[in-house]
Image (spheres, rainbow, N blue to C red):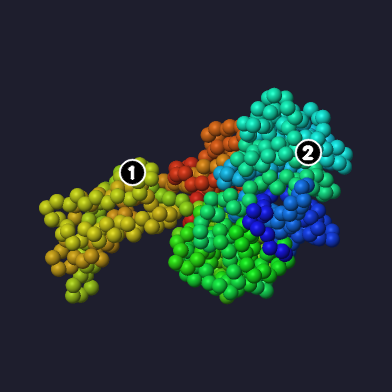
Amino acid sequence: MKKYEPKDIRNVVLMGHSGSGKTTIADAMLFKSGGGSRQGKVEDGTSVFDYTSEEIKWKISISLGLAWLEWKDEHGSPLLINLIDTPGYDDFRGDVIAGSRVADGCIIVVNAATGIEPGTLKAKELAENLKLPIFIFINQVKKPNVNFDKVLKEIKDLFGRGVTLLAIPQGDKIISILESDSPYKSDSLETIAEVEDSLTEKYLNEEKLEPADIGKGLQIGVRTRKVIPLYSGDAYDNIGVSELLNGLSFLNSPLEREEAKNESLSALNFKTMVDPHLGDLKFVRVFSGALEAGTNVFNSNKGKDEKLNQLYVVRGKEREEVKSLETGMIGALVKLKATKTGDTLTSKGNSVKLDKLEFPMAQIKMAVIPKSKHDEERVSVGLSKLNEEDPTFISFYDAETKQRIISGLGEMHFNVMLDKLKKNFGVEVGTERPRIHYRETITGMAEQQGKYKRQTGGHGQYGDCWVKFEPLERGKGVEFVDAIVGGKIPKRFIPSVEKGIRESVERGILAGYPTTDFKATLYDGSFHDVDSSDIAFKIAASMAFRDGMPRAKPILLEPIMRAEVIAPSEFMGDVMGEISSRRGKIERTEPVGQHQKIYALVPEAELYGFSTSLRSQTQGMASFSQEFLRYEVVPRETQQQIIEEHKKVSTTRKEEK
């Protein structure tokens, strides 16, 4: 690849709902530019961007894909375009965020047959948060029963007045709006003219806007995000792709990024992939300065030096070694020891730190069980490596439930990652439901003596305390109050009483769950000059807890999640019914484009498998997120089931011992 100046580089990310055809567009753009002898196809496993075994198996984008291409726009100016293709499936949103962070503009792809979808909304939100200039491509216009005007109206309603239609389909051809007498022309010209005073004056005076005027208006409009160029076509048959490529010349160059103003080197590691031959492959975007092979750089996040070995530019699974990566370039590094996803590389003695990547929180959890106990360490190492590839996939050991938990963005996410675990690390795991972090509390008051007296020859053990247990407001935790007067219990033993109470709360008396939201007041007791000890008062306190709490009307609490669902309006009845069937309470709904957003409160225990059901009910067009809100009382009949289940598990464990 020849060397390009930063002013001639364009970094573009493709985003949109799953199935809109982002990868097909990327493959078509690469082919159109001369980047291959034939156009790659997702369905036959030849896509340049979807090349991993998992992507070929599932026929969806799982990881972001990179490829560079060279393009001369309609004026003959050469450009280097770095394309970043991202997954549409919401389970792999982490790579959408990573790819968008290092792009200078985005192409949001809309399916002509389905119009605005949840993935479109998320793409718009992300682009606006990152202040990325937006291009829109209406794809698959050759599908039967496409209503172009309806889709156009949906897009304008969602994206606003800046949407500027530039190309429309006519059979197997694309008609330029600005070079035709179509009914859309006046709207497009008006939007372009509004971005700059001299153009506005010329337009209002009914003077003709020359091609140079239009080009100027589009360039200013795109870079200031006042204009959203809208193209259309059918990428599978390579219709409308050239027009889209030409339009990318209006996009800002890497030199216009704020980060490019740094005088020193700054590069962001935005993605890690494990290569079977090269090891960890670190994808980087150079924002300022240059990375040069054979030199040392400084990881400002870790405070460590890194030696740069081979540097590559990437085209799908193919890599071409280069001597340097200049400002604006996207490439790959190998054999870095300390650098992780999100880290900044800079020059020695520099403290530059680029904004880190903000990944979405994991939405669902699953417990994994190694098929063999001998595999436990390999499972742990493998899961840790998979987290490096995808920071939205997390694993940890839950000490409370005694389970190894994986958490991610959906069931498909788990399927793919566990496939990778087996393929790349040679270990298999079974799965089971993660146990819920229930809590116990009390609703009444009880006073209880705890007395521990033991004589076994020599010094004995003696501890005696009276404790009052009473409920606190939800979320207050455990409060211990020392109300001893008159020295009935010496001050030196009071901490032992508190320790006995706090250790006892770890295993509640109903179903063995931690106890919370109560106050324990130590108000009376007695001691022995010789036999009293810290351990004796600690045991006495635990006895008071064990015997007093059952009389304080104990109940179970369950975690309640705030769930947000975005779904097409026609599925609202089914979705709300599904939420209600899971003991959920609808808080409110609000329109979001052609969709509805549902806010609901749902017990965590009832959300297991919800994302799968949701996708099934909505033909994959809904998205879902959740976060912990608070603890609430478990309904009586459900509480009894949990207690009975606890008894069964306890009995089984005793029998196993």
284 to the left or right of 527? right
Task: Please provide percent x and percent y for residue 206.
Answer: 72, 25
Say which mark, if any, is on residue 177. Answer: none
Check the image and report above or below for 192 versus 392. Answer: above
At x 81% / y 60%, what residue is drawn?
Answer: 36
The residue located at (66%, 32%) in the rendering is 199
Sort mark 2 into few (<14), some (14-19) or many (20+) by Cα contacts within 10 Å.
many
Residue at the spot of label 1 = 472
Q: Residue furthest right?
A: 171
- Element on which disc 1 rests: loop
> Could you give the CA–CA distance between mark 1 and mark 2, rounded to whole angstroms?
65 Å
Which residue corresponds to the image point at 58% horizontal and 32% vertical from the top-left? 590
For disc 2, the marked residue is: 167
Crowd rating for badge 1 (residues with CA inside 10 Å; few <14, some 14–19, many 20+):
some
Does residue 496 sit above or below 185 in this rendering? below
Which tag, 1 or 2, sits closer to the chain's start?
2
Nearest the eye: 254 or 634: 254
Expressed as whole percent of the image width and height from the top left, the position of residue 34 reads 81, 58
Seen from the viewer's position, the closer of residues 176 and 94 is: 176
Please state which amino acid type lies under the numbered disc 1. Leu
- The answer to whether any part of residue 388 appears in the image is yes
Q: Is 495 on the left or on the right of 624, as rendered?
A: left
Type of amino acid under label 2: Ala
In the picture as drawn, the residue positioned furthest to the top comes out as 205
Figure quadrant of the N terminus: bottom right
Q: Is residue 591 above or below residue 63?
A: above
Please tell me whether mark 2 sits on a helix, a strand or a loop.
strand
